[in-house]
Amino acid sequence: MSHPSMNHPSEAQVEKHAVSRYSGGARLNHWITAVTLILLAISGLSLFTPSLFWLTGLFGGGALTREIHPWLGVLLFFSFMGLFLRFWKLNLWNRDDTAWMKNIDAVAKGDEEKLPEVGKYNAGQKLVFWGMSLSIIALITSGIVIWDKYFYQFTTIDQKRWAVLIHAVAAVGAITIWIVHVYAAIWVRGTIRAMTQGSVTAGWAYRHHRKWLRQEARKPEAPRPAQPAE
């Protein structure tokens, strides 16, 4: 007769069991977007106020920073578009998200048992996703209007002034959302592993994204390659 522990894994074994969350392609896409956003924020802030102009030294001076900054914006747009196409369906709002938001006090306290089971993303993550999507659309649109080297003749001075204002507001919004995103990833222990190793522990998935874990568990396992005959 087999020992019970041989048939039923311990809590520690379940906790350590890895559950795949992001593919290598998705992680690469994420980190390109993240690094580009940071470079874009630094270069943009260096041109925004004289007190931060010294940051242009990181990009080879003011003139070169002005050349690089809009191209970083183009790279960010297309890189984020890759993330958007991968994940927009998973970020559509549903009734569980509304219930999650109504229990935001339990979220702040980390009382997961009072929250509804959620899929791959909770309401907070979805707000970050859509907030960043809108910010990047506003940034690229307004950025093109004020990119005088190529588009000066296509817009009026008044349109450029409005674009500068929209660009600044959208940039502040994107930076704020990024800070919230990073803080949440650090606050919820075990989250960063998803974007560095591509997996999370089963215990993490059960606590924070139980519905998603159940969906993953129902997926058929990939067939194993046949072993060569000896």
Image (cartoon, rainbow, N blue to C red):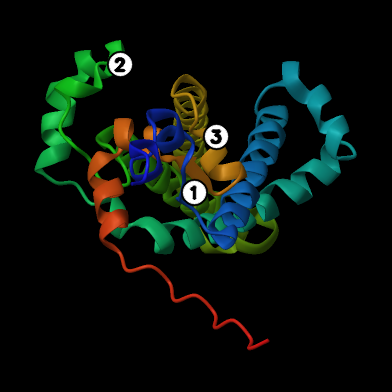
Q: Report x, y in % for residue 123.
A: 25, 36
Disc 3 packing (10 Å; few <14; some 14–19; many ≥20)? some
Query: Furthest-bottom residue in view?
Result: 229
Q: Amino acid at mark 1?
A: Ser
193 relative position to 214: left or right: right
Pick the front one: 157 or 61: 61
Can you say whether 188 is above or below 162 in the image? above
Element marked by disc 2: loop
Q: For mark 3, what is the residue?
A: 192
Mark closest to the chain's N terminus, 3 or 2: 2
Q: Residue at horizontal 82%, vertical 32%?
A: 56
Q: Which mark is residue 110?
A: 2
Q: Nearer the viewer, mark 1 or mark 3?
A: 3
Inter-mark Cα distance, 1 to 2: 39 Å
Q: Report x, y in % for residue 4.
A: 33, 38
Q: Amino acid at mark 3?
A: Ile
Can you say whether 104 is above or below 177 in the image? above
Q: Quadrant of residue 63?
A: top right
122 relative position to 96: left or right: right
Q: For mark 1, what is the residue?
A: 142
Pick the front one: 106 or 140: 106
Q: Amino acid at mark 2?
A: Gly
Q: Residue at horizontal 26%, vertical 19%?
A: 107
Q: Residue at horizontal 33%, vertical 57%?
A: 88
